[in-house]
Amino acid sequence: MTKEQVITSLQDLPDSFEPEQLIEHLISLQKMEEVLEQVRRGEVVTEAEAKQRLAKWLS
C-alpha cells in the first residue's frame, strides 16, 4: 500500500468519520491488492475447476 492510496482513502471519506471506517477501508483495499496479485501470478482457478475440485463434497 502506498501513501497516495491512504491519502485517496482519506479524501473519499466524509468530513466526519469514525477511525474504524478508515481502518476497514484500508483493510479492504489491501485485500483487493492481494487478490489482484494472486491473479497476476496465476494462482486462481475457474468456477468450473472449483466445482470439479469440490464435487466430492458437494454431492
Image: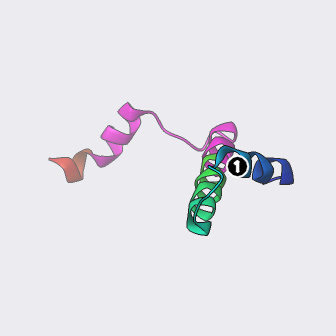
Image colouring: rainbow
Name the foreground residue: 41 vs 6.
6
Instruction: Let me know if residue 55 is in the magenta part.
Output: no
Q: Main secondary structure of the magenta part?
A: helix
Looking at the rendered structure, the secondary structure element under dot 1 is: helix
Looking at the image, residue 38 lies above or below residue 31: above
Q: Locate residue 56 relative to residue 21 in the image: left or right.
A: left
Looking at the image, residue 20 lies above or below residue 54: below
Residue that sits furthest to the bottom in the current view: 19
Residue positioned 70% across, 49% down in the render: 9
Q: Which residues are magenta?
A: 33-54
Q: Position of residue 2 (x, y in %)?
A: 83, 52
Q: Locate residue 34 relative to residue 2 in the image: left or right.
A: left
Q: Residues within 10 Å of mark 1 (few under 14, many from 20)?
A: some
Q: Position of residue 34 (x, y in %)?
A: 65, 51
Instruction: Let me know if residue 35 is in the magenta part.
Output: yes
Residue positioned 62% across, 68% down in the render: 19
Residue positioned 54% across, 41% down in the render: 44
Name the foreground residue: 14 vs 58.
14
Identify which amino acid the numbered label 1 is placed on.
Answer: Ser
Residue that sits furthest to the left in the current view: 59
Residue that sits furthest to the front in the current view: 15
Q: Position of residue 6 (x, y in %)?
A: 76, 53
Residue that label 1 marks: 9
Dividing the picture into quarters, in which one does residue 38 lie? top right
Q: Locate residue 56 relative to residue 49 in the image: left or right.
A: left
**The N terminus lies in which quarter of the figure?**
bottom right
